[in-house]
Amino acid sequence: MSTDAQENYRDTVAQSLADPRAFWGEAAGLIDWITPPTQVLDETNPPFYRWFTGGRLNVCYNALDRHVVHGRADQVALIYDSPVAGSKARYTYAQLLDLVARFAGVLRDLGVTQGDRVVIYMPMVPEAVIAMLACARIGAVHSVVFGGFAPAELAARIEDAAPRVVVCASCGVEPSRVVPYKPMLDEAIERSAHKPEHCVVLQREQLTAELGERDLDWKQVMHPDAVAPAEVVPVEATHPLYVLYTSGTTGKPKGIVRDSAGYAVALRWSMTNLYGVQPGETWLCGSDVGWVVGHSYIVYAPLLAGATTILFEGKPVGTPDAGVYWRMIQEHGVVAAFTAPTAIRAIKKQDPRGELIGDYDLAPLRALFLAGERLDPDTWRWATEHLGVPVIDNWWQTETGWPIAINPLGPDGATFEIKPGSPTLPTAGYDVQVLDEKGEPVPAGTEGAICLRLPLPPGTLPTLWQDDERYVSSYLSTFEGYYLSGDGGFVDEDGYVYVMGRTDDVLNVAGHRLSTGSLEEALAGHPSVAECAVIGVSDALKGQVPRALVVLKAGIELDDAGREQLQAELVQRVRAEVGAVAALRQVDVVDALPKTRSGKILRKTMRQLADGQEAMVPSTIEDRSVLDALEQVLRGR
Ligand SMILES: CCC(=O)SCCNC(=O)CCNC(=O)[C@H](O)C(C)(C)COP(=O)(O)OP(=O)(O)OC[C@H]1O[C@@H](n2cnc3c(N)ncnc32)[C@H](O)[C@@H]1OP(=O)(O)O
């Protein structure tokens, strides 16, 4: 660990905060512009800050065409590795560009123009990446919906985004079953008030879908005789590249807007300066294109950097075993990998001594990055001990699009000492402050609400899709001049950030962000349920799993068999309404829920009891005996 590198990085971050215009103005040179920006940071309409105004560019051009023009045409851009489909494929930059330009032509011929939305509901297949980049090419706004979401969640997103076209696959392939996607899309469109004009369906051999009137077959429309490639459409720097829905505390998802230029600049900068990956190198990000990590670090950042990215359709274990990541690292010559702590916990459970690691040559690997949930010290220690490379935590959110805090990887490894449990230091552009309830900064080591002083750096959300008001009320209204992250934690004397968990009721199940509100809505729709609460409790594998408590309607009496039947129905209901990914397994029928006098359910207190922690009971509790009666239920799992 060189002290020069540490000083340089601290200087970089200090400069990015002291003079963001100079800092990001210089970083803007990392991408190609059609028209350079006239202003680096536009602060004329706070709290709505805009980056690189006046500039015009195309993100697809920067991710593909530029590399073809500059000598990377024959370099592999994308490796598809699917143990579940038994399939592998490699696409050079030239081949990927050809497919993307053709699919952009398909969308154009279907009437999609700049600013139109296109929903993409696909598993981890190359066509998902092709569809995303094709949208970017013609200035359409993509909105990718994770395949593990059920029709109701998909419907909510279709209704909000109002897409002209939906792109979907006939099915996904999970280790234990083939998941029919097309019927779920049909049901979602049925439920949604907005109806897309067309659906382009990729027929997969594992299960083909029946096509209806509005449906088109991907292979047919992509035939070179059927479509002419589309040219790049220049867009404004602030033009939305995509909308990605994320869970808030209520059932209605938030449409995180991502601008074009700020995102391209920040991601390109991060790939080399934070993750230490150079053009031409191979990178593995084991996430899903339905999540922000997939958007940023499977698709956009590695391609913007001219690297080779791997699209992995499989699981860290069981496809076929806990050595699949190590196999890919060896086979594809991966220099840095990125996944969620849950994935490492799953691997550790199956291969506690890390024996499968020894079966592969991991010599090219320089680091493993982990994010998506808190990296517990045990998991960090296991991975560090068995991999022999720096294991680097990084903290960020769907909203920010790229790391808020990380230990940057330099040529000599991690730049700073790793302190287990901390994602290390704030990144360039992020002014991290921990505030107390009154909005005052707390001393080092004291827990509070982790906030970011405005303006946020490029690449972060400029607003919510068609909902400026919700953007302000959700993130900016608690403490004036700050973005409220929703995560709580502290900063130590060395400036290291520690993120301890959500301060609101958002769940994080195996790195998947889910809303308690949408699970509760699903449960509350059952005819026997009067009211309910969902809490996230600690889980050794998934970090957190949901647990539901339901109160029955007056007059409903159930014996043991009746309760079991109801519990099974409620689990099934959440699966059908939210999706299998919610992983609700435990439902308890209780007499009442603990509340404050103003009617707020005490989810945090219940969560503390369920996790065996000391429960903080607010003085405003309405009836203490309700909580006492629940204590045994919650403590005994
Ligand atoms: C890097 C930071 C991030 O991006 S975090 C977001 C992504 N997170 C990860 O990639 C974490 C890695 N985690 C995993 O691979 C799994 O959660 C592990 C730990 C292996 C556990 O596997 P499993 O028990 O099957 O849980 P799961 O969460 O994968 O799935 C739960 C149920 O949902 C289903 N599901 C999941 N994905 C999809 C999908 N794309 N399309 C359709 N269904 C999906 C799974 O099949 C599973 O269903 P079931 O309950 O087994 O019937």
Image (tube, helix red, strand yellow):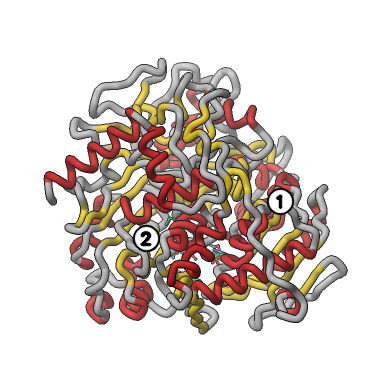
Is the CB atom of the residue marked by disc 2 within 8 angstroms of ligand 1's nearest atom? Answer: yes
Name the residue located 42 percent from the left edge and 24 percent from the top edge.
Answer: 617
Reply above or below: 393 against 175: above
Q: Foreground: 14 or 435?
A: 14
Q: Position of residue 528 (x, y in %)?
A: 72, 44
Q: Position of residue 448 (x, y in %)?
A: 35, 27
Residue 17, image quadrant: top left
Q: Which mark is residue 600?
A: none
Mark 1: secondary structure: loop
Specify which label sits upstream in the sequence, 2 or 1: 1
Q: Position of residue 497 (x, y in %)?
A: 29, 37
Q: Position of residue 209 (x, y in %)?
A: 75, 75
Q: Residues within 10 Å of mark 2 (few under 14, many from 20)?
A: many
Numbered circles on residues, count: 2
Residue 345, image quadrant: bottom left
Q: Residues within 10 Å of mark 1 (few under 14, many from 20)?
A: some
Name the residue located 52 percent from the left edge and 29 percent from the top edge.
Answer: 42
Q: Which mark is residue 338?
A: 2
Reply above or below: 334 against 417: below
Q: Which residue is mark 1?
A: 114
Look at label 1 and name its amino acid.
Answer: Gln
Reply above or below: 269 against 74: above
Mark 2: secondary structure: strand
Q: Nearer the viewer, mark 2 or mark 1?
A: 1
Task: Please state if 511 lies on the left or on the right of 210 as rendered.
Answer: left
Look at label 2 and name its amino acid.
Answer: Phe
Name the residue located 32 percent from the left edge and 51 percent from the top edge.
Answer: 274
Q: Foreground: 298 or 35?
A: 35
